[in-house]
Image (cartoon, rainbow, N blue to C red):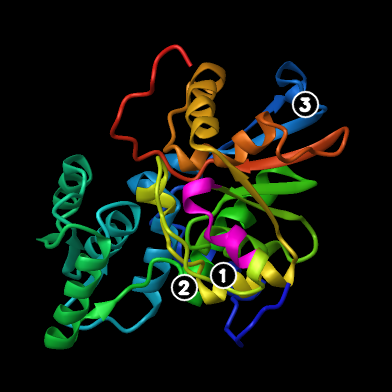
Amino acid sequence: MDTGEVTTVPTPDDIVRAAEVIASHVRHTPVIEIDGESLGLDATLVFKLEYLQVTGAFKARGAVNYVATQPISDAGVVAASGGNHGAAVAYAARRFGHEAHIFVPTTANPSKVERLVDLGAHIHSIGQNYDDALDASREYLAAHHATSIAAFDDPVIMAGAGTVAREFEADAGALDAMLIAVGGGGLSGGAAAWCGDRVPIVGCETVGTASFAAAVEAGRPVTVPISGVAADHLGARQVGAIPWDALARVNATSVVVTDDDVLNTQARLWRLLRVVVEPGVAAPFAALLTGRWVPSAGSRIGVILCGANVVAPLASGR
């Protein structure tokens, strides 16, 4: 892969420091190991239950690392998001005594907006889609000189996200690969920055959110249309420049699954582990169950379940 422009990928030392900074503010999430034989897989699967993280997703790690270590304006912090990133920023801001202004489209799910309110955020509901909310957040930043917190394309955010992989390895022991859902690439890029050439990274997406797959094909980040069941949580139109650099350095593998694949896998996770995750979060396990990525015989495969802010019930009978 061509890494393209020069960027600042966090180092393992950055990730160690981030782990120390965020330790008292986030959860050390557990792992669970199962024999893949019952699933038709000649491998041991080790799941990282990161969906148990505060705010229900890994993003709290990066947001806390940023707010704890970077200069924050007296005008508070700003993010455009009605989902996991907004909740993470609101949580980190409250934890450190800052105001949080979260810009969401009017179409944002009411349950997710309610969560932002519960976290003490000031909600700005503007426009019909994410881009409208993002434009409004930029106007607010220009007028109020607040601090913007990126969702994924930032080395401090990525260092926080990379603590997931560090913690996973420490608890799970040796892994032969790590399968991770990719949106903008903050989590997968952070994992790549931590693992280096030691553990292969497999980035998993749906057909409607395949920004990483498109970057692999083009040799650089490119814009893709977003659609489907994972659009609200894996729906970055372009993988971030810094995450791309990290993933490209380790030649991370790209796997794309369908919407039906992840919906079926959501239900399978419930039956298997009594775990409910967001559709796109099921993409790594779907890659295994569908055979779109085949593990080596007898290998130990890590699967990160990175978020569970589910607002719709699982379909029955799948």
Q: Are marks 1 and 3 in contact (CB under 8 Å)?
A: no
Residue pointed to by mark 1: 243
| Horizontal and vertical percent position of residue 51 | 45, 41
Magenta highlight range: 206-216
What's the amino acid at mark 2? Asp
In front here: 303 or 217?
217
Asked if residue 269 can be seen in this view, the reply is yes
Q: Are marks 1 and 2 in contact (CB under 8 Å)?
A: yes
What's the amino acid at mark 3? Leu
99 sits to left or right of 93:
left
Looking at the image, tell me whether mark 1 or mark 2 is earlier in sequence order: 2
Looking at the image, tell me whether mark 2 or mark 3 is earlier in sequence order: 3
Specify few, some or many for label 2: CA neighbours under 10 Å numbering under 14, 14-19, or 20 or more: many
Residue 232 among magenta residues = no
Whether residue 283 is situated above or below residue 4 in the rendered picture: above
Q: Secondary structure at mark 2?
A: loop
Whether residue 119 is situated above or below residue 45 in the rendered picture: below
In front here: 111 or 217?
217
Quadrant location of the N terminus in the rendered image: bottom right
Residue pointed to by mark 3: 41
Specify few, some or many for label 3: CA neighbours under 10 Å numbering under 14, 14-19, or 20 or more: some
Answer with the quarter of the image where residue 96 lies.
bottom left
Question: Could you tell me how far apart the alpha carbons at marks 1 and 2 are, in whole angstroms?
Answer: 7 Å
| Horizontal and vertical percent position of residue 198 | 80, 60
Residue pointed to by mark 2: 153
Looking at the image, tell me whether mark 1 or mark 3 is earlier in sequence order: 3
Instruction: Count the labels in the image.
Output: 3
Answer with the quarter of the image where residue 7 lies.
bottom right
